[in-house]
Amino acid sequence: MRRTASSWRCAVGFGLWVTACGGEETRPGTVPTNGPDAGDAGYQNGSEPYDGSVPLPRRDAGPSTIPPGDPEKGLTGQCAVDSNKIYTVAERERPFLSTPLAADPNNSRFIMPFVATGDCLDSVHMATLMGAANGGEPVDTTKIDTCALVREAAATALSDRWLLATTDNREAPYDVWLTPYNPKTGDVAESQRVTETPSVETALALTTLSDGETALLAYGDQQRDVGQALYVRLIDNLGKPAGDAIKLDEAPDLYFSNLTMKPLGTGAGLVYVRSSLDNKTSDIVFVALDAQGGRIRDPWVLTRNAGPSPSVDLTVDSDGGGIVYARAEASIGRQIWFQKIDATGQAALLETGTTRAPALRIVNSPARGIDVSIAQLRASFVLVYRLLPQTEGGKATVRAYFLDRNGSIVGSSDVSYTSVGSGRTSVQSTGDGRVVVAWSEFTDEGLSALKVARLPCVGN
């Protein structure tokens, strides 16, 4: 069946339905980007609000009835994907450059915020995957219409609600806004403006701390002729700033991307890519933060000269975790590495108790492993990446590797065929061992699509 950008999706058994929201048109009066980190919306300075007003976010539940879905067939392998467990979340004409899948590890639920055309410029849709662990009835989608151009979106489970962060220009140029969202009622609270400067906010990362009541927000800040800075800020359980922004990094000739943050002790661990303006050289950096967002130690540069388009992700719990990153290596191609870390965010000690674990090469497929992500299972890890084809014109594969606590591969599963070029892959897990994979790809019709799949790997 040919899918169109205006069709509806219903993932019966996956607990998700959303609008496909594609077919966007170029908007007059906007300023095209000229920066290296243009973001999802593709506008640098944006436009003024549509009519000078800043409307409150609103709920739009859509139709009262939902037609059956049309899931796709998954591939095979250890922990094989069920043939009815791959779903299209949304399609649109401009590319999805990120897949901000988020998990509530304590309540076994997932959410995917994505940007689509709204009644007034862009809107953010919250695709809620309730009951993704074991099926369940579909739930509706909340649309937050801000009458603005939206570049980035991220979400985290905070107290009994989701907290949505967006970078948009509802009050130009671009600022970070936070919006609490109640998944039970679909209601959204009034948005809080976190930044208010003449600069343009870029990359986003958001995570809930171990107390479950506060969060940390990280974002890039870009000013013309000045360069970029990387900030982090404490957020309370109402989605409001609870302290001043703390500057972590800055440089006049670099920019920051691939921000990912996870709880670490009472604070958080943050990984990011620090790239040159021409995107030819880049460092992959990790920094441990306290509960206020301050640095505990100097930044740890995991690798230098990671090449163009590197990626990085991390996962950690009370027993430690791991960092994965993809880097390009001269004469070898793109490789994927795993760095085991302890519960403080340092390289884990080996069994000798005196030597710290080195980084391990996980994927040795020259120039073929990109877009890496990692999540934690009960006693292991699941690593997901995009495996490029060996021959020109072939299809790429979304592949999952299962690693033991030391980073050794103990199993694998090919999730789906996909297009070669598109945005990031993402994998998230919950405390009961449920795993959801998300990625973006280009369809045969030339649209960009967001995909999700469940890996039924309970008990790993």
Image (cartoon, rainbow, N blue to C red):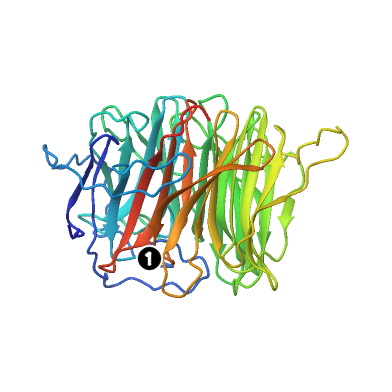
Q: Secondary structure at mark 1?
A: loop
Quadrant containing the N terminus is: bottom left
Look at label 1 and name its amino acid. Gly
- Answer few, some or many: residues within 10 Å of disc 1's Cα (few below 14, many 20 plus, some between 14 and 19): many
What x and y, as percent, mark residue 65? 11, 38
Looking at the image, residue 139 lies above or below residue 248: above
Answer yes or no: is residue 122 visible. no
Number of numbered discs: 1
What x and y, as percent, mark residue 214? 53, 30
What x and y, as percent, mark residue 419? 39, 64
Looking at the image, residue 70 lies above or below residue 460: below
Looking at the image, residue 32 lies above or below residue 58: below
Please report the residue visible at 24 percent of the width from the left and 34 percent of the height from the top. Answer: 139
Residue on which disc 1 sits: 46
Please report the residue visible at 53 percent of the width from the left and 30 percent of the height from the top. Answer: 460
Q: Considering depth in this image, is 372 or 362 the residue closer to the camera?
A: 362
Please report the residue visible at 39 percent of the width from the left and 36 percent of the height from the top. Answer: 110
